[in-house]
Amino acid sequence: MPTGTTPRLFPIGDDGVMDESWTSMAVTEVRTGDRVRAANGQEVLVSRIEPAFLGLDGMVALIEDTATRWFKMPVATAAEVEVQRGS
């Protein structure tokens, strides 16, 4: 992140508006097939959702498991995330 920039919960475009193709929702509403964008800008295409991540009821892990990438994103169940959902 460039010096002097303010970190944002959700990335905002140059015009100050959140990208319309992304929707904020509770992590509990995420389902397999959704693309989720984290606060740091990383994205995960959800293949699986692991409940009670590390044995904690307040956490889930969103897992991308594709031929080209394996990635696990732990998220609090009370969190809101940015989601891009296919039609």
Image: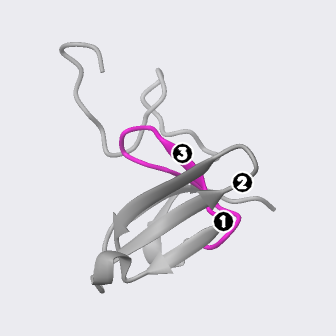
**Alpha carbon of mark 1 to alpha carbon of mark 3: how far?**
12 Å
- For image coordinates 50% across by 65% down, the residue present is 62
Residue 35 drawn in magenta? yes
Q: Amino acid at mark 3?
A: Glu
Cα–Cα gap, marks 1 and 2 = 8 Å
Q: Amino acid at mark 2?
A: Thr
Side of 52 where 87 appears, left or right: right
Which of the two discs, 2 and 3, labels the residue nearer the N terminus? Answer: 3
The answer to whether the residues at label 1 and label 3 have Cβ atoms under 8 Å apart is: no
Callout 1 touching callout 2 (CB < 8 Å): yes
Please give the residue where the numbered disc 1 appears in the rendered image. 47
Residue at image location 30% in from the left, 84% down from the top = 55
Element at label 1: loop
How would you classify the magenta stretch by its main secondary structure? loop
- Residue 29 shown left or right of residue 84 in the figure: left
Q: Which residue is mark 2?
A: 66
Assign a secondary structure to mark 2: loop
Which region of the structure is painted magenta?
A: 31-46
Q: Is residue 3 above or below residue 28?
A: above
Whole-percent x and y of residue 75? Answer: 36, 65
Residue in the picture at 24% in, 20% down: 5
Extreme-left residue of the structure: 4
Read off the residue under disc 3: 43
Residue drawn at (72%, 43%) of the image = 68
Residue 42 percent across, percent down from the top left:
47, 41
Q: In the image, is 59 to the left or to the right of 86?
A: left
